[in-house]
Image (cartoon, rainbow, N blue to C red):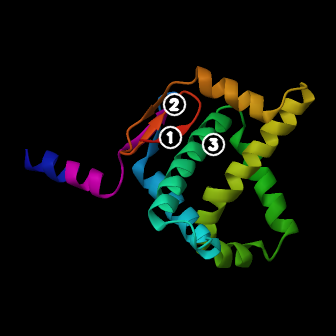
Amino acid sequence: MLVVGWGSYWTVNRGFYPAATVNYKIISARNLENNYQSALGYYVKIKKPEVSEQDLQKEIRRATLDKLIENALIYEDVNSSDIESQLATIIQQNPNLEQGAVITYGVSWEVFKDLILRPQIAAELLQKNLQSKNENLDNWLKNKKQSASIWVFSSGLRWSGERIEVN
């Protein structure tokens, strides 16, 4: 019983529990928190003084989970080897990208690739594929979100059927 207690404590303490699920794939609380902290750090640098800190934090958390859900849906339709191949090309063509990313976002290079580059590359690959079929990414995402099984477990947030909203 003690092992179960410690295991549960460790799991919760490290954020290894679901903040949401998308088609039965888990978005962990840890993943949400890492993305949220990165976005918050970036927006605090450019924040306008008339925005309250609490409202800014709520909106960033909402937008972060919404983006993670979109990313999960996009990753379902994009080959991971295509993402890695494109990532290698981008890094080779932009030798100063690592330095700029670390300074701008305040995260490590590996975290930047996971939080920013891979999701952007996946979206661009999917968009290119959709354009060849005379479809666009916005309509595709809207349809995919409506048909997906999405559950939100993060307090203060809920799924409206189209997007994440603050309770």
Residue 105 vs residue 61, the one in the foreground: 61
Q: Work out which residue is located at the far left of the displayed protein and give it.
A: 1
Secondary structure beneath dot 1 equals strand
Residue at the spot x=81%, y=42% of the render?
125
Residue at the spot x=84%, y=59% of the render?
89
Residue 88 vs residue 116, the one in the foreground: 116
Q: Amino acid at mark 3?
A: Asn
Q: x, y (%) of residue 159? A: 49, 33
Vertically, is 72 above or below 59?
Answer: above
Task: Check residue 14 for magenta coloring.
Answer: yes
Residue 69 vs residue 78, the one in the foreground: 69
Query: What is the spatial separation of the Cα atoms under label 2 and label 1, in whole angstroms?
Result: 7 Å
Task: Check residue 91 for magenta coloring.
Answer: no
Disc assigned to residue 71:
3
Q: x, y (%) of residue 4? A: 15, 45
Q: Which residue is mark 2?
A: 160
Vertically, is 14 above or below 1?
Answer: below
Does the image show residue 34? Answer: no
Local packing at callout 3 (Cα closer than 10 Å; few below 14, some 14-19, many 20+) is: some
Which badge, 3 or 1, comes first in the chain's sequence? 3
Q: Which residue is mark 1?
A: 165
Query: What is the spatial separation of the Cα atoms under label 3 and label 1, in whole angstroms?
Result: 17 Å
